[in-house]
Image (cartoon, rainbow, N blue to C red):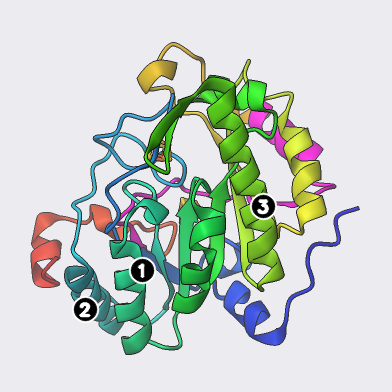
């Protein structure tokens, strides 16, 4: 039965102002994504690495990578102009946990804006190891992309991982990543972080398996699950993306186990503003006015 995790007062407030965690917040509150994390430590078969991380972002766009100092400057300008932005997130363009700049940026932001909610997304490979650093920087909402909990299925989705100086492939790689994702999610929740899981729905590969993921997320105390449609590119260019009906059916099957996010916009790694108005796509003139 899906009762969801029990959250304290402070976290409930943060969630009620987070446009991705609370659908009622999406029209009132915004988020800013800071594109400070270009490197990635795995290769998903649906990812073309010159573009943003597909696990959290809209594929086919390339966000300009910022240094932590530039990211702080951009945040200052944008928050001054858009005070309804309550969440500062790092979601790529690669994996935030594969880039030290992620933590440098969060520290700069937290010192300047102690009230803001810090949020990040990851493929989870480095989550158990990096959790102390995540906690130290004060991240309170975390997204982990979990596309399978069965290594045989995961091995079809991720070509290889780069872990502790070594490349792993196939089922061996899948076992390491799944273990780290699930251990990391559990430890993050135990430490008081609110966790969202993104799952890319890949017809013919994980469509029948996603319900098993949802049951596991229920056990772990995950707050919300976001079933995202495959965008067919990279090694998966020949696969058919799911229809909206197929996605809806999967969401409905998972709903009894974990709350479903249905308003995801598959944002860019440099998106900001309200979810419905992606201001990173504003005109060049407008960008010049706010100097980004
Ligand atoms: Fe691409 Fe993101 Fe997968 Fe890395 S984790 S390969 S950036 S989709
Ligand atoms: Fe929220 Fe989806 Fe955009 Fe991530 S990609 S910020 S979950 S709407």
Comparing marks 2 and 1, which lies closer to the viewer?
A: 1
Q: Nearer the viewer, residue 35 or 253?
A: 35
Q: Is residue 89 in view from this perspective?
A: yes
User: In percent of the image, x 63 and y 15: which residue is there?
Assistant: 204
Q: Which residue is mark 2?
A: 77
User: In percent of the image, x 29 and y 80: which residue is there?
Assistant: 108
Crowdedness near tag 3: few (<14), some (14–19) or many (≥20) residues, C-alpha within 10 Å: some
Horizontal side of residue 116 vs 200, given as left or right: left
User: In percent of the image, x 73 and y 39: which residue is there?
Assistant: 213
Mark 3 or mark 1: whose residue is earlier in sequence? 1
Comparing marks 3 and 2, which lies closer to the viewer?
A: 3
Q: In the displayed structure, would residue 9 be above or below residue 273?
A: below
Q: Which residues are magenta?
A: 246-272
Q: Residue furthest top?
A: 238
Q: Which residue is mark 3?
A: 183
Q: In the displayed structure, would residue 111 be above or below residue 268?
A: below
Horizontal side of residue 12 vs 236, given as left or right: right
The picture places residue 35, in percent across and down from the top left corner, at 28, 57
Crowdedness near tag 1: few (<14), some (14–19) or many (≥20) residues, C-alpha within 10 Å: many
């Amino acid at each position: 039965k899906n009762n969801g995790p029990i959250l304290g007062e402070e976290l409930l407030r943060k969630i009620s102002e987070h446009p991705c965690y609370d659908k009622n917040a999406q029209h009132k509150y915004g988020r800013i994504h800071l594109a400070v994390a270009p490197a990635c430590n795995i290769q998903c078969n649906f990812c073309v690495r010159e573009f943003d991380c597909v696990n959290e972002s809209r594929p086919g766009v390339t966000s300009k990578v910022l240094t932590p100092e530039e990211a702080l400057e951009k945040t200052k300008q944008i928050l001054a102009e858009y005070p309804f932005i309550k969440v500062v997130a790092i979601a790529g363009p690669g994996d935030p946990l594969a880039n030290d700049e992620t933590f440098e940026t969060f520290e700069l932001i937290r010192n300047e804006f102690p009230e803001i909610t810090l949020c990040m997304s990851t493929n989870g490979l480095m989550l158990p190891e990096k959790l102390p650093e995540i906690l130290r920087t004060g991240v309170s909402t975390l997204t982990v992309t979990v596309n399978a909990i069965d290594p045989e299925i995961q091995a079809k989705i991720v070509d290889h991982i780069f872990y502790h100086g070594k490349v792993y492939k196939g089922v061996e790689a899948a076992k390491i990543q799944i273990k780290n994702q699930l251990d990391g999610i559990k430890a993050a929740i135990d430490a008081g972080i609110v966790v969202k899981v993104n799952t890319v729905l890949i017809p013919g590969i994980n469509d029948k398996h996603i319900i098993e993921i949802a049951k596991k997320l229920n056990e772990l105390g995950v707050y919300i699950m976001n079933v995202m449609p495959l965008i067919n590119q990279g090694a998966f260019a020949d696969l058919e993306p799911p229809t909206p009906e197929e996605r809806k059916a999967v969401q409905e099957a998972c709903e009894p186990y974990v709350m479903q996010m249905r308003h995801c916009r598959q944002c860019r790694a440099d998106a900001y503003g309200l979810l419905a108005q992606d201001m990173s796509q504003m005109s060049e003139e407008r960008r010049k006015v706010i100097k980004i």
